[in-house]
Amino acid sequence: MVITTDNPKRPSDYLSFKPPYQRLEVAEVCPFCPGNEGITPKETFSLSHDGGWSVRVVPNKFPFFHIEGEFDRRPEGMYDVMEAIGAHEIAVEAREHDHRLATMDPTQIERILLAYRERLIDLERDRRFQQFLILKNYPGIFNRHPHSHILAMPIIPRRIDEEIWGTLDYYQRKERCIFCDIVKEEISMKKRVILESAHFLVFSPFASRFPFETWIVPKVHSPDFHHIQEEEMADLAIVIQSLFIRYYKLLADPPYSFTFHTSPVQSPFHRSEYHWHIETRLRIGLREGFEWGSGFFVNPTPPEEAAAYLREVE
Ligand SMILES: [Zn+2]
Ligand SMILES: [Zn+2]
Ligand SMILES: [Zn+2]
């Protein structure tokens, strides 16, 4: 990881960069628009509001992997193992095709969070699934209708596994949670904090790999996102809206991805020492070719500066 501090890049330096798919728009009928519900598989969850649905969750027609079949651990590697068994669902986040998190009412974001929580509670009953992953790419690569992915997997992906090992290692040495310590440290230093609410801290992590990378971390220790309480969900919805409107204004509606990292669910893999959180990453890299080729991440905007820009957005 490299953070360049000579001539750091400011928000305006990223504005000319748009990935090519941002210019594409699919011309076909949108399966997520109201009236086209028959095109998608039957929903696994929906919330009704004003005589229609407000959020729908449906199995993905073209999943990364599918739910049928018994999982047997084969030697072909992670991708083939995930092919064997897993659930992949799509949360359709709103009725409106052109809606986005930055301009959504926080009560709508709260409904999306509720949908995530209810699906994970349900999927947890299937003992084959060890790891959940919620993720979103904006804009969607194949469909612009606002949606996110809910994945349940029989194995723990390497990124999360590495984080868990880091957490356990720290716990063994200090008998404290590293995420709880980071939250305390960031609050006391202030310079990387973007915003703080009753239940969450939003900050640019120390040694960020990507420009404007941001973490949203609950201030009170909790390993599992799906054990979130109503009051925390309402607070998180406001925090998410506030962060994404800052990105929207500062960087002219940038493409982004976010993911929820939460503890594996089944014993013996569940880790009470782990601390769930959300990581967001803007897809505005200026030197992705170099990063791809070298494995070094070059971040031309130091996290302290990114946080200051995001904090000061009006
Ligand atoms: Zn649509
Ligand atoms: Zn913690
Ligand atoms: Zn993480």
Image: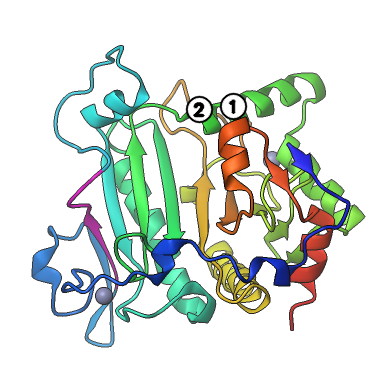
Q: Nearer the viewer, residue 183 or 5?
A: 5
The answer to whether residue 138 shows anywhere in this view is no
Left or right for 86, reference 212: left
Where on the picture, by quarter, is residue 142?
bottom left
Q: Secondary structure at mark 2?
A: helix
> In the figure, 308 relative to 99: above or below?
above
Q: Nearer the viewer, residue 313 or 20?
A: 20
Which residue in the protein does label 1 denote?
162
| Percent x, y of residue 4 | 82, 47
Q: How far apart are labels 2 and 1 at the CA level?
A: 6 Å
Q: Residue furthest bottom?
A: 50
> What type is the residue that disc 2 sits on?
Arg
Q: Is the C terminus in the top left, top right, bottom left or bottom right quadrant?
A: bottom right
292 or 42: nearer the viewer: 292
Q: Is residue 269 above or below residue 280?
A: above
What residue do we see at 66% from left, 52% from top?
Answer: 217
Residue 41 is tagged as none
Circle 1: element type: helix
Q: Position of residue 235 (x, y in %)?
A: 60, 68
Measuring 30% from the left and 47% from the top, which residue is drawn there? 122
Circle 2 sits on which residue? 158
Left or right: 166 as drawn, with respect to 68? right
- The 10 Å Cα crowd at callout 2, few under 14, some 14 to 19, many 20 or more, is few
Which range of residues does the magenta coloring cover? 55-63
Nearer to me, 181 or 301: 301
